[in-house]
Amino acid sequence: MTEASFNLQGQKILIVDDLVEARSALKSMLTVLGADDVYSATDGREAVEYIMEHDFDLVLSDYNLGKGKDGQQILEEARYTNRLRATASFVMITGENAVDRVMGALEYDPDAYVTKPFTLSILRERLYRLSILKTILLPMNRAIDQGQIDWAIEIADQIRVEHPRLLLPVSRLQGKLCLKQERYEDALEAYTRVLESRPASWARLGQAVCFHFLGDTDQAVSLIRATLLDHPLYVQCHDWLAKILVGLGKGEEAQQELEAAVKISPRAVLRQLELGQLALTNESYTVAQDAFEQAMRLARYSCYKSSSTYQQFVEAAQHNLDAEQTKENRLLCSKALRALDEMKQEFSGNMGVVFDATIAESRTYQAVEDDNKARSSADKAEGVLARIKEPTGEQQLTMTEVYIDTGQSEKAVNMVQTMKDQGVASTLLQRLGAIEERLSNINAREKSAELNEKGVAHYERGELKEAIAAFDQATRFEEAGISVLLNAIQAKVSYIENEELDVGQLKDCYRLLRRIGSVGHFDERHDRYQRLKETCERLRRSAGL
Amino acid sequence: MNLKDLAGAIIHDLKNQLHSVLLEGEKAMRDMPEEYRDKLYPVFARSRRVHQDAMQLVTLYRLQERGNFPADDAWPADTVKHAIECFKVHWPDVEVHVEIDPDCQGYYNDSLMQMALTNLLNNSAQAGAKTISVSAQEQGPGLLMRVSDDGPGYPDDVLDGSGDSDKEGGTGMGLYFTELIVAHHSTPAKPATLDLHNAAGGGAEAVITLP
């Protein structure tokens, strides 16, 4: 084949551009080049649908597609799902501003790119050069399509020796495959070979990634930082730097890198998800909320759609919510509830997801302290759980926690008992232990309150000894509140004043006062505390102590 | 937004609009009968010229803003061919001889180098050359490209670096732009150079050496 005889006849081709003139111009150029089987898509969603349905030989996509997915995301989905064979080609069409973004991708790089504006003859030559390259790489790409990656790497070695001019494309592919196979030494060799003759940024990043996997993290970080100095917009450098920093336990720094990457290229779902998760661990809830919100929006029509994105968004939002009646709070709360409604709808066939969404709904209401609605969502969750044939231990524990949070500790106690009867997986024991501790605290508080009531009743009937006995029991619980402690003091003081000066009781009063510590001026119990304290002082003086 | 950024944004938009005009024009030219083509051609040629100027301005702006123009495998035969296509729109009568092996390969930014070569061709034609020769050869890992003409040669002030060679009708960016593009291809190990001189037998000669 010569350039003049280059022909696209019989090839299944997809063109993607959001602008009608650009699409028709490209289509007519391809027709001149002999193409007779051309599909066109106007946005990323349509493009991916076509790619899922047809086996294309060639995809030509504009990088910038206005709203929705960009060309890079189409490429990623096409390759990620293996719907576009390795032997098929993806050509990215870019404005001159985006060339560096397209060229940098280590994992999902297009087979060729054409910079706008281009003429028919530029397109013809690009496609012709690409067809020559693809023909030479055919045995290697066939091996990739058959999943024989190590074999493909071997073929690459042969091709490189036979065609030294193809050093760059072959080494790039080889590096990528070696990384995939975790053959880091070999990948490093491929990238280093490129850098010996060409200062390609992707090869520098590739080298850094190899150093990272081989354990030389410092070298990796400094290499990436140097590359970023030359190319501040090289988004994959930020991604890898973040990944490495996380490994070093530098979560905050890693988050900064991902935030920089998201600023440069905000449309990648996976990157937004990674940022969200990292920010959640770093407790940067505003960043996490934004990232998950973007991810939710971007993933809506993609292969990355997942219920956990919705859930994580709501989880982050809950941290940013409080009981204040502000406009922001109301907006955020309804946004979170909308996300949960969508989650229930999108995954309505999966009761586990519906359960998670309903639980999250209850927790969202808890965050804004709307106790009634939190309780009614908890009831709904209970209903959903009842419809799950074999609920997991995790679901049961979650339900138990929400019972406690919505003031239904009896149900919680019953659930814990049921779980224990069924047998609890060892991985869940720690969580169960925490729940039991919470329940025993609640129990103690309730007991203490009960004894306190008993004490008050005795006191009102003038049975001071009995009252003191009840309050002494009540205050033995660590959870006893200030009012209970004050009641106990009151009973003892009355006893001393009316019956006898019992030094032991007076000492008790001081112990209890110390336990209370101080009560602030604005606390409604302040006056009572102050009065009792003064009475104790007076009694102490009159006792000559 | 400052004036410079505003100007940059406007030129960028202008360039995109012109590109659409050109695409429509190209399509119309293909579809229309031969006799009308000649009538439309001057309009088309002028539009392309304006578009090229806008492209240069945008690129110049981005080069100065330290924009990134990544280099990649590229083929001088293709690059030169497209530079000549651009050139021929305005100078259909100037002859250009090309001596480049189609397999000759280099490592540069294709769009930038095409602009640099178009500039050198325009330069020669503006100076009065009737025939221009372009050649390219691999030199180890590097590349050598030569543009020579049968014109009067570079004036002294250009050769000693004190003046601008652009003659009337040019955009005033001329060789400066070409120099910037070539310099952009320097590596830490080896600079990229643009060497201007007059050939012994007369005529101007520009030699681009890429590492």
Image: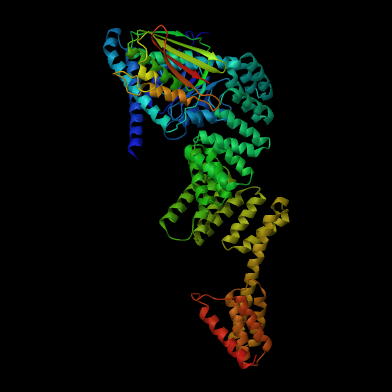
* Residue at 66 percent of width and 19 percent of height: A157
**Residue B75 showing in the rendered view:** no
* Residue at 49 percent of width and 45 percent of height: A293
Q: Nearer the viewer, residue A415 or A275?
A: A275
Side of A185 relative to A24 (left or right): right
Question: Where's residue A414, x and y in %?
Answer: 66, 60
**Location of residue B188 (image quadrant):** top right
* Residue at 50 percent of width and 29 percent of height: A102
Quadrant the C terminus of chain A occupies: bottom right
Question: Where's residue A309, x and y in %?
Answer: 54, 44
Colouring convention used in this rendered image of the protein: rainbow
* Residue at 45 percent of width and 56 percent of height: A329
**Location of residue A204 (image quadrant):** top right
Q: Does B81 appear above or below A441? A: above
**Residue A285 showing in the rendered view:** yes
Question: Where's residue A21, x and y in %?
Answer: 36, 24
Question: Where's residue A64, x and y in %?
Answer: 44, 30
Q: Nearer the viewer, residue B185 or A366?
A: B185
Q: Which of A57 and A378 is in front in this view?
A: A57
Q: Does A163 appear above or below A63? A: above
Q: Does B7 appear above or below B44? A: below
**Count of marks, rendered view:** 0
Side of A299 relative to A461 (left or right): left
**Location of residue B141 (image quadrant):** top right
